[in-house]
Each structure stands twice: as C-alpha cells, then as structure tokens.
Amino acid sequence: MSQLAVFHRLSDSELWNQVCLGSEQAFEVAIERYQTLICTVAYNICGDLVLSEDVAQETFWAAWRTRLALAEPGKLKAWLCGIARNLALQAGARNGRSAGTSEVAVSDREAETADPAQVAVSREEGQLVWQTLQQIPETYREPLLLYYREQQSITDVARALDLTEETVRQRLSRGRALLRDQMADLVAGVLSRTRPTRGFTLAVLAGAGMTATGTHTALAGAAVVGTSGVAAGTSAGPTALAGGAVSAGLVGSFLGALGGLAGGWVGFWLPAQVAATRAERTLLMRVGTRLLCGSLIFLALMLLLAWWGLPALDGFAKFAAWGGLLAVYVLFVIVETSGLILTLRRWRVNPGPNLEPNETRLRTALQR
C-alpha cells in the first residue's frame, strides 16, 4: 500500500499530526479531503466562482503556514472553514464586492485560451446562477451547493456539514422549492416584458387618424409587431408609407410579426425544457401554445381589418375597431400569463403529485 493510500485511511487528527511533522503528502491528502467543502464555503460568502477558488487556495496556504497553531487536530474541518470564511469576507471587501453585487471574473489564463464568446456566456451564466442562489437563505443554500458539488451525495453533504442525513434531506427539499420559486419569478419577469409597449399604443392612435389603404396596412403590421416586441415589423411601416406599396408593407410587416412570434415561442420552449418537473414543462408548453395560437389569430384579424375593414370606417368607428381588437388581445395575454404564474406559485406551496422530474435532453445535458 502506498504512503498516500495510508494517509487517506487516517482520521483528521492523525492526518494533521503528520502534517505538523512536515509531511507534504499528508497535506496533499488533507487538501483533497476538504477542497470541495472549502471552495463551497468561500463561494457561499463571496458569490464568485473564480474568487472562491483563490480564497480556497489561500486558506490551505495559511493552514500550512500555521499548521502548529491547531491545538485540536480533530477539529481540522471547522478550523479550515473558519479560515475560509474570514478570507472570503476580506477578499470581498478588497474587491468592492458583496454577495449581492458580485460579478464573475475570468482568470488571465482563461482569458488567453478561451473563446471570447464562451467567456461572455460563462460570465452571464455565473451572474444568473448567483443572482438566483443569493435569494435563498444560507441555511438552505450551503447544503444545496455542496449537494451538487459532491456528485449529489446526501451522505457526503451530511458528513461535511456535521448534520444528520434526514436534516440534509429536509434542507435540500426546502432549498429546491425556493429555487423553483426564483425560476417562477424569472418566467414572470420575461412574460411581463413581452406585453404590448407604449409604441404599440402610439401606432394604434396614429393609425386611427389615417385613410390611405397602404398606410393602414403598414400600421397594422407595426401594431402587431409591437405586441411581439420585434423591430422588423415596425420598420416595415415607414417603408410602405414612403412608397405607397401596399403589398410590400403587408408582406414586410407580416414577416416581421412572424419572427416575433417565433421568438416568443422559443421564450416558452426553453424554460419548459429546463423546468424542474414534468408538470411544469407541460404547463409552460400549453400556455405557450395557446398564446402562440391567440397571437396568430390576432395577427390575422389585424391584417384583415387593415386590408378590408378600415377603409369603410370613419372617425370613432375606426378607433373603436382598433381599440376593441387590441383590448381583447391584451386581456387574453393577461389572463394566460396570470394563470401561469398563479399555478406555478401554488405548486411551490403544495406540489402534490407534480414532483415527477423533468428529464428532457436539454436539462440532462445542462446538469452534467
């Protein structure tokens, strides 16, 4: 049996006694034994993946320099965690960071070798992960971090935190529920940002006062695109106005609106693929499908109104036709999105039978 293998079988107290005698191999084993825990403790405080690894390295260096200061070697784990917490707080203060405002840094070596696009994605992913995690109380966040870093082993997490396995299970369950709440709020935020904007209202008001068929066609496309949040349809309106080309304005606006609808569908499809449970995925897909169908119907009605209806209307009737159609569509969007948000929040409080995990290929790949 090799010397390293012998050291791996030693208790913390026996191992650190060997470290105090100057054994570098024993120190190597101590690092391997607690590096995941120390990196996680540091990340839990500073919220920065790269900085947390720097802090963990400094922790072990400090432990080596002051190895004789540990009066009770059996408390090695608690001693290392204490050093890591202090260094993480100091590092955050030096860098002007806090858990709420930390940004993911990229090391010089990574910056030299990594693709710039991948570096940018890594920054965004790191920021999104921490922005979500920092909303979870530390009592539940630390076990959750360790659980995924310890290859999803409840036994290892319990041993690292000196907790019972049952306590770890309870905290993990609560932590996952809080994570799902944060994702529900993220979905709600995305949906709220895709509602009709002020530009849509102005387009409707402007269209109500115009009489040329080409003008109505272009503005119809612009209004529809305003609903889907796509600039292409809006730019098609002025083109049709300038040239008086009814067909060009119609086709350009229609294609722009379809592009916006496609983007909206992707906005539902992606969250559905990475949802925590199959029930959430099904709910998101159903709501997304209904909104897509409703938007297509709204688009068709707007084009029909612009092509055939508005030229025959005058004054208030023209405005009422635009406004009525818009009001019905906005009400439809509000009802669908509100129902989605309320259902997701109700499931957070009382999951019931909706706990079957979502095992899509995309979610499985992201978890690797």
Image (cartoon, helix red, strand yellow):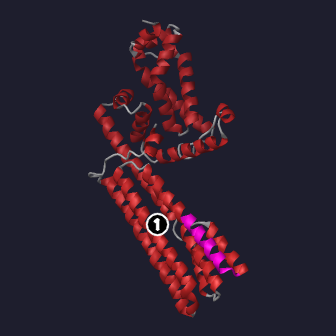
Find numbered disc 1 in the image and state the secondary structure of the residue it sits on: helix
Location of residue 19 with respect to 334 vertically, above or below: above
Give the x, y percent position of residue 337: 42, 65
Give the x, y percent position of residue 166: 28, 35
Give 336 or 60, whichever is nearer the viewer: 336
Q: Which residue is mark 1?
A: 292
In which quarter of the view is residue 147 placed? top left
Q: In the rendered picture of this protein, how many numbered marks are placed on residues?
A: 1
> In the shown orientation, is residue 194 left or right of residue 152?
right
Give 14 or 336, whichever is nearer the viewer: 336
Which residue is at a point 39% across and 53% down the rendered structure image? 281
Give the x, y percent position of residue 220: 58, 78
Magenta portion: prevailing SS class: helix
Give 62 or 141, whichever is nearer the viewer: 141
Type of amino acid under label 1:
Leu
Crowding at label 1, few (<14), some or many (≥20) Cα neighbours within 10 Å? some
Which residue is at a point 54% across and 38% down the rendered structure image? 46
Q: Residue furthest right?
A: 242
Where does the magenta region start and end? 244-260
Give 212 or 196, whichever is nearer the viewer: 212
Decide if residue 103 is in sight here: no
Q: Is residue 257 found inside the magenta-colored segment of the image? A: yes
In which quarter of the view is residue 57 placed? top right
Q: Residue furthest left?
A: 352
Which residue is at a point 36% across and 57% down the rendered structure image? 345
In which quarter of the view is residue 207 placed? bottom right
Decide if residue 165 is in sight here: yes
Q: Which quadrant: the N terminus? A: top left
Which residue is at a point 53% across and 81% down the rendered structure image? 304
Give the x, y percent position of residue 172: 35, 40
Q: Is residue 272 found inside the magenta-colored segment of the image? A: no
